[in-house]
Image (spheres, rainbow, N blue to C red):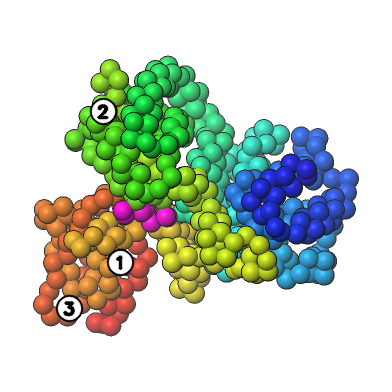
Amino acid sequence: MEELLKKIKNYLCEQNFTVIVKAYDFAVVAHYGQKRLSGEPFVSHLLAVANILADWKMDILSLAAGLLHDSIEDGAATEKDLQKEFGETISRLVSGVTKVGQVKLRGSTDEEFVENLRKMFLAMSSDLRVVIIKLADRLHNMRTLQYLSAEKQTRISRETLEVYAPLAERLGMGEVKGELEDLAFPYLYPEDYRWLTGYSAAAYKEAEEHIIRAKQKILKNLAAENIKATVNGRKKHLYSLYKKLLRPEIDRDLSLVHDLVALRILVQTADQCYIALGVIHKTFKPVPAIGISDYIAVPKPNGYRSIHTKVFGPAGRIIEIQIRTYEMHEEAENGIAAHWYYSNKKSQGLSGKKLETVVFAPLEKLSWVKQLANWQKEITDSHEFIQELKFDALSHRIFIFTPKGDVKDLPAGATPIDFSYAVHTEMGDRTIGAKVNGKMVPFNFKLHSGDVCEIMLAKEPRKPNSDWLELVTTRLAKREIQKGLRAEN
């Protein structure tokens, strides 16, 4: 508890912490006599969750809800008790986390599982803090998974990989997503985990040695340009490496993975990011075939901002270098939580009633959360809902450019038809051809992140082609095609 209070005083220095102490005392009573399977008092889990939320710089109400999140489901408290003692907002957050906690993976068409998923996304759409508290809860539970039975370890790890890690990614919480995947990896794929840890150990060590040599040169040259920077090595998450090695073009060949250990350069301003890029390219030659990815000029759909470049480092080894500001780094690690913290810090400071009443609602770039809530009304079939969820909302995301430089967020596997409907529904119906990166492609062409897609349109309005239903992946495109076909019939 002392550690928690010390953390929150560092970023909520003018707040009243009475509610935190009160929530802790309430939780101790609600869980009196309860122990975890590790033998520790149950309240140790609640403190761990609250500490994770404090690491993400969450607000006072979220921290209190983190301490209370199991009071109804596993404790002796009721929702009325929480409303009476802590008010409507904290009670609603705890209730929302309780509903999200009921998501148990029992098979892709299990009615109860689907219904709980629906509740989860409805809760998310009204206040994103619900799912952030749940992610902190899941993270600590995964860190202590060794105390559960093998059956529960497998089920919880699969839930984590299929639901919670993708959610963390969509919320821009890259470090959380990576840790959740790495924690689930040995339970779901034990043989591959053992193989990869052995296979990659020497390669990680060699890559780290190259990174250290590159770091020394870059720091020296940045100092010559009067840029103060923090330069660190970043090891690729093991599960992320595993997925990359499974790609056909890599086929488990570690020598083809250039970001096994990457250099991360942190500076004060966006302008310094571009100066640092110039310094790096003076120090080490860039790899022309791979090129530069500028996610500062064009952020990823989940808000991620950084510049990535690959260079020929010491001994000619290709290394990846990431350049970002300290604020961008915080947002890349902790996503929407960090974005909320910085937004409030800039606009109104971190004190007073304004902060306590702020609604943690989706930002414009997180419109997919609202879209999920709308799906509840559109999709009644459980199997269809799960399919749409896995292949659209929670799939790996790509971003595709229009010829004018606008960017559209699509699921992996999307085609030019998906892109056309994402730009405008009427444009989708009138599509007669597509170019990707200046070359004509068929409608079943799978788009890749960073592609520039140009759509050829018919001069007159027209009905969509029924064959397109087999080519598209997004819920939006399917719905609009079906709507056009129904109108024609």
Percent of width and height locating residue 232: 45, 31
Q: Nearer the viewer, mark 1 or mark 3?
A: 1
Q: Please give the name of the residue rendered at 23% of the width and 39% of the height, measured from the top-left corner.
A: 291
- Distance of mark 3 from mark 2, alpha carbons? 53 Å
Residues in magenta? 297-303
Residue 170 appearing in the image: yes
Number of residue marks: 3
Residue 422 marker: 1
Tell me where residue 143 sits by quadrant.
top right
Is residue 237 left or right of 135 when viewed as pictured?
left
The residue that disc 3 covers is 462
Percent of width and height locating residue 204: 42, 22
Q: In the rendered structure, which amino acid carries the disc numbered 2?
A: Phe
Percent of width and height locating residue 324: 40, 44
Circle 3 Cα neighbour tier, 10 Å, few/some/many (<14 / 14–19 / ≥20): some
Looking at the rendered image, the quarter that the C terminus falls into is bottom left
Q: Please give the name of the residue rendered at 53% of the width and 28% of the height, measured from the top-left corner.
A: 190
- Distance of mark 1 from mark 3, alpha carbons? 18 Å
Q: Nearer the viewer, mark 1 or mark 2?
A: 2
Earlier-in-chain disc, 1 versus 2: 2
Asked whether the residues under the numbered discs 1 and 2 touch, taking CB atoms below 8 Å apart as contact, a structural biologist would say: no
Percent of width and height locating residue 270: 37, 49
Element under label 2? loop
Residue 284 marker: 2
- Distance of mark 1 from mark 2, alpha carbons? 40 Å
Q: Nearer the viewer, mark 3 or mark 2?
A: 2
